[in-house]
Image (tube, rainbow, N blue to C red):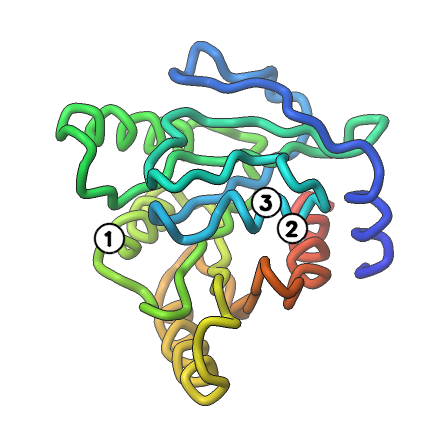
């Protein structure tokens, strides 16, 4: 699976479109895997590492820049899509904007039949926060299968990483729609990226 996933991501990967509202969603013709995460969790960097492209997803010094659902196509012929969901938990965004994003995410999760899995990114330096639990609850209620991915694993000590991974796994086991295994990654050093690619391919297979 690791080699198959590597080859797939080494092939065609391209930006398809942004959807500010549900009317702009692409046809539900192939399986999709969505990426969700708090602003500043390193989602854009992880997507770039996953696809092996430096500027696939825009990285920004201003958290909360992604205000739309961004779709990327993988494979030629097209095999599946990646969906970059708007970051959540930004302190500076106006309340009505946050509400709009929340509705967009909620409606997308509940109504997208081709969505096979969501990958919820958790900053390994902080572990699961209350703002993360909100999206986990949303996914549980929408009955969307999801898996938690720890990011920035290179930023903490090995002993702390073991501890936060265990804590995250304990929480995952309590949740109805969560995959029990936690993925541990570092975009900067490529740690866990082959396993993440394999997890994406496995979800859409």
Residue designated by label 2: 49
> With 90 as the anchor, is 123 left or right in this view?
right
Q: CA distance from mark 3 to mark 2?
A: 5 Å
Rendered position, 97 above or below 169? above
Q: Determine whether the residue tagged by mark 1 lies in a helix, strand or loop.
A: helix
Mark toward the viewer: 1 or 3: 3
> With 185 as the anchor, is 159 left or right in this view?
left
Q: What is the x, y in percent for residue 182?
A: 52, 68
Residue 36, quarter of the rendered image: top left
Rendered position, 41 above or below 179? above
Rendered position, 167 above or below 69? below
Of marks 1 and 2, which one's residue comes earlier in the chain? 2
Q: Which residue: 66% across, 41% down? A: 54
Residue designated by label 3: 47
Q: Quadrant of the N terminus?
A: bottom right
Q: What is the x, y in percent for residue 139?
A: 37, 46
Q: What is the x, y in percent for residue 176?
A: 39, 59
* Label 3–label 2 contact, CB within 8 A: yes
Of marks 1 and 3, which one's residue comes earlier in the chain? 3
Q: Determine whether the residue tagged by mark 3 lies in a helix, strand or loop.
A: helix
Q: CA distance from mark 1 to mark 2?
A: 25 Å
* Label 1–label 3 contact, CB within 8 A: no
Q: What is the x, y in percent for residue 71?
A: 57, 27
**Furthest residue in direction front, as rendered:** 61
């Amino acid at each position: 699976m690791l080699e198959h996933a590597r080859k797939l991501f080494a092939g065609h990967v391209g930006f398809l479109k942004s959807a500010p509202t549900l009317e702009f969603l692409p046809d539900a013709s192939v399986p999709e895997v969505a990426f969700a995460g708090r602003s500043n969790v390193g989602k854009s960097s992880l997507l770039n590492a996953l696809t092996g492209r430096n500027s696939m997803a825009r990285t920004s010094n201003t958290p909360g820049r992604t205000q739309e659902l961004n779709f990327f196509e993988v494979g030629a012929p097209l095999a599946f899509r990646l969906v970059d969901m708007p970051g959540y938990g930004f302190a500076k965004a106006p309340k009505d904007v946050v509400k709009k994003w929340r509705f967009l995410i909620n409606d997308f999760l509940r109504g997208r039949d081709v969505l096979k899995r969501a990958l919820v990114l958790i900053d390994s330096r902080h572990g699961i926060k209350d703002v993360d639990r909100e999206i986990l609850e949303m996914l549980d209620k929408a009955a969307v299968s999801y898996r938690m991915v720890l990011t920035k694993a290179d930023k903490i000590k090995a002993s702390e990483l073991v501890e936060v991974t265990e804590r995250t796994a304990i929480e995952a086991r309590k949740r109805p729609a969560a995959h029990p295994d936690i993925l541990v990654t570092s975009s900067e050093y490529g740690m866990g990226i082959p396993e993440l690619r394999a997890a994406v391919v496995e979800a859409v297979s």
